[in-house]
Structure formats: structure tokens, C-alpha cells
Image (spheres, rainbow, N blue to C red):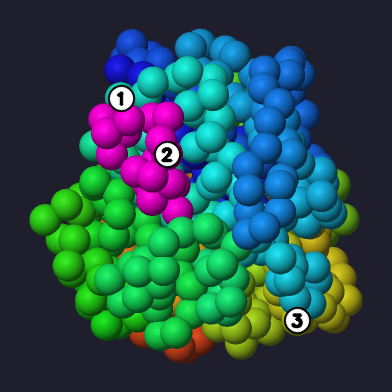
Amino acid sequence: MKIIMTASEMTPFVKTGGLADVLGSLPYALSERGHDLSIFIPFYRCVEGPMLELVYKGYVTVGSRRCHFEVIRISAEKNVHVYAIRKEEYFDRSFLYNLPHRDYDDNAERFIFFNKAVVHSISQLGLKPDIVHAHDWQTGLISIYLALDPHLGPSARRPSIFSIHNVAYQGIFEPNEFRMANLPDHLFSPHGIEFYGKLNFLKGGILFANHVTTVRPTYAEEIQTADYGFGLDGVIRSRRSHLKGILNGIDSEIWDPAKDKHLPEKFSHRTLKKKSVCKHALAAELKLDIAENQPLFSMVTRFAQQKGIDLFFQALPEMIKRGASFAVLGNGDVTYENQFRQMAAKFPSRMAVRIGYDDSLAHRIYGGSDFLMMPSLYEPCGLSQLYALRYGTIPVVRATGGLNDTIEEWNPKTHEGNGFKFSHPRFTSLLEAFDQAMRCYKQLKAISALR
Ligand code: ADP
Ligand code: GLC
């Protein structure tokens, strides 16, 4: 089949979270099964490619503006062609979606443009897809434009899939932005992309794609409930017969401690002793004082409320008192960034914090730490805990969403399970799971078996 995917992020070109990892791996897995893949992403400032080949130049109309753009092929490996939509005015910026303190004012316009430009390019490049698969709110209008494009013909209406990676991020904008979309007025209604008087991109994807998927079978159920639907549960229930949850996978080639070029020493489950080389190199890099048998905990995360960072801060002084050291890599919410800086200043030799996005350091942290903490308040799927498992780094997680589904509590008697978890979103519960992890760490046989 000819499959087109489109999203706002794709590793290794541009990434803020797990969405990028899915786009950087799923197309290659599909191509190995004989499919032809074309991917469309925005040409952000950070995007670089092995090739930069101009394949199309044209324009789309956004509101009353004629928006000229270019389509650049940035990679064509293993039957996966990656196209980036270049429009500097919209995408050549320091950050993807926001400045440190607020979202960009023109996000609706930027992504209306992107959706239109992708659909226009599909027809102009003559790609004739069997399936167009869009991901997350930034591409929520794709199926609507596909149905309306005069050049694509009626068959284009059949094959669209929309994947929800996190229903909390919906792309909600003021109603006056709707005019930028140049869509018929009747679509700004409860049966269309209007949502409590505003414009809602995600709703467009859910209602107008032929099929909707999400990142885990149980997430497909959860998002139909008021607790996890973030207001869209009713809309999602109306599509339940076309909704399916499929568990995310990881790219086990890129995330492989036996081949990982970012690690100072490669290791596998057979040579786990070498993991300690990675640990001590990481401690030296981050200027942490770690005694021979002291555990290193880590976090690699977006700094967002979703990730349970408040719980973590509440428990942190006690965890340090009880003997743990921490390596944290993340960025996002400026308040959290500052709180992390303060904590690092308070416990200089026990807590290292790196603010920013750093893929290579992320690999070294998964490779070098003993435990990965993910106290998320909710988690559609979560990939970080899966990477940690692959590196013999034991997840300590809150039992929610994908973390609950993928992490099974370690049983010291039967040696079953793969991590530690707690249920209540209270720091005392987090501390209980932490204590279990510490107890296990002190027993060489147990921790080796668990790894
Ligand atoms: P989410 O998509 O909600 O952020 P996931 O666990 O699905 O959560 O995916 C997060 C991905 O982003 C992982 O690959 C993780 O290693 C990576 N990541 C998060 N923050 C950073 C960062 N600051 N630097 C490098 N990688 C990061
Ligand atoms: C979202 C979710 C995360 C999921 C990722 C990839 O960002 O927050 O749980 O793993 O998408 O699907």
C-alpha cells in the first residue's frame, strides 16, 4: 500500500516527546512489511536532512492570504520518503509551539496552513495514497481537507486514519480563527469542529477521519470517560465503532544498549556488569558524587503537570535523605524548570539537572541510571519506561494508563514483575514505591534478576 503519514514531529528531525518517536519508527516498520511511505512534517528551524531536494513550490490560501511554500524531500531511506513543508514565516522559529511564557499567537493559522499545504502537496506530487494517517491535533483538519480537495477525487474520502496520542492536547483556538480555515460555515457547529464556542482541531480528526486509533487498547476505553476524555469523551463515544487502541512499540535498533553509539560502554543482558561503567561515566559527566553501592535515579521528561512533577518535588528531600541521587533531563514549563534548578542548587552533589532537549544525554541516562521515575498523573502510553526496561533501568511509576499496563510490580519472592509502582497520587505513596526499589537495590541477587 501507499501510506502517507503526517505529524508535527518525527525523530531524528524534530522532537519534543513520544509522538516524534512513533513517527520515526512506525513508518520504517511498515516499510519493512513492503509498504511505501511518505511522511510530511513542518520544516522547523532544527530540521536537517541527509538530502535537501526541492520537489514542489506552490501556495495555498489561508483566510485571505496567499501562502507560498516549498516542499523539500529531506530523506529517502528504506522506502520512506520524508517531506518537509518549508515556510519560514511559520516554522523557522526557536521553539515549536510556544515562547517560554505563552503559546505563539498564530498557532491556529500555522497549523491550518500546514494541513492545507500537506493535502495540496499530496495531490500536486501525484502521490495517490491508499491511506492517509494523521497524528495528533496539529494534523486534525487533514481528513476534512482531503474530503474537500477537488483534485483528489472521491476515493480520497475513504482512507484516512487519525491517531490520538494524548487527548489532553486538543489545539483549541478562538472562534474567529475558523475563518482562516476557509471551510464551509456549517462545519463550525457541534457536529463539526466547534467545541463550546471555540475551534477544536482534535475534534476534527476524531469526527472526520474514517478510522481513529490511539496508543493503547485501554486508552481507547479511558478516553470515552469523563475522567480521561478531557471534554471530548462524548465526541469519542460517538465514534467508538471506528476506534481502536493499538499499543505503541519502540525502535529496538535505536534503543539497544548493545549497539548504542551514545554509551561509553555497550552492554546487554549478558554483560550487565558493564552497565556500571555507564553509571560512573554519567555521574562524572553530571558531577554527581556516587558511592560504589549508591543508587542513581533518573527522569527524562517533558516538564508538564501530566508527568507528576509536583509529587516528585514533594518526595525529593526525603528520597535524597534515604540515600538516592538523581539525574534529571527535561524542559517545558518554565516554573518547573526553575524549581528543578533550585533543587539542583540545594543538593549539588546528589541532584543533577540538565534543562533542554538532548537526545544523546537521554541515551546515556537510560544507560547509566539504576531506576527511572515516572510519577505521571496520567499517561496515554509512555515510551520512556519502555526504553528504560531495554537498558536494565528499573521503572518506578505511578500505576496509571500505559505505565500501569506495561509495568508489573516486582515480586521479591517469585521474581516476577519488572518495576515498582504506586497508585495514589500522593507523595507518601511515591515514597513507599521508592522504598521498595531501595530495598531491592540492596539485594544484589534480586536487583540482578530484576534487570
Ligand atoms: P510524552 O510523549 O508524553 O512526552 P513518552 O514517554 O511517550 O512521553 O515519550 C517521551 C520521549 O521524549 C522519550 O523518547 C524521552 O526519552 C524523550 N524526551 C523527553 N524529554 C527529553 C529531553 N529533554 N531530552 C531528550 N529526550 C527527551
Ligand atoms: C503522547 C503521550 C505519551 C505517548 C506518546 C506517543 O505524547 O503523552 O504517553 O507515549 O504520545 O504515543
Considering the whole magenta stretch, tell me its main secondary structure. Answer: helix
Which residue lies under the disc numbered 1? 130
Extreme-left residue of the structure:
241
Q: For marks 3 and 2, give the one nearer the viewer.
A: 2
Task: Name the amino acid type tagged 3.
Answer: Thr
Task: Name the amino acid type tagged 2.
Answer: Asp
Residue 96 vertical placement versus 120 (above, below) = below
The N terminus lies in quadrant: top left
Where disc 3 sits, the SS reads: helix
Residue 214 vertical placement versus 176 (above, below) = above
Q: Position of residue 248 (x, y in %)?
A: 36, 44
Q: CA distance from mark 1 to mark 2?
A: 16 Å
Residue 47 in which image quadrant: top right
Task: Name the side, left or right, on which 301 lies relative to 239.
Answer: right
Q: Position of residue 25 (x, y in %)?
A: 48, 31
Whether label 1 touches label 3, CB < 8 Å: no
Which residue lies under the disc numbered 3? 335
Q: CA distance from mark 3 to mark 2?
A: 44 Å
Camera-nearest residue between 407 and 165: 165
Which residue lies under the disc numbered 2? 149
Camera-nearest residue between 70 and 245: 70
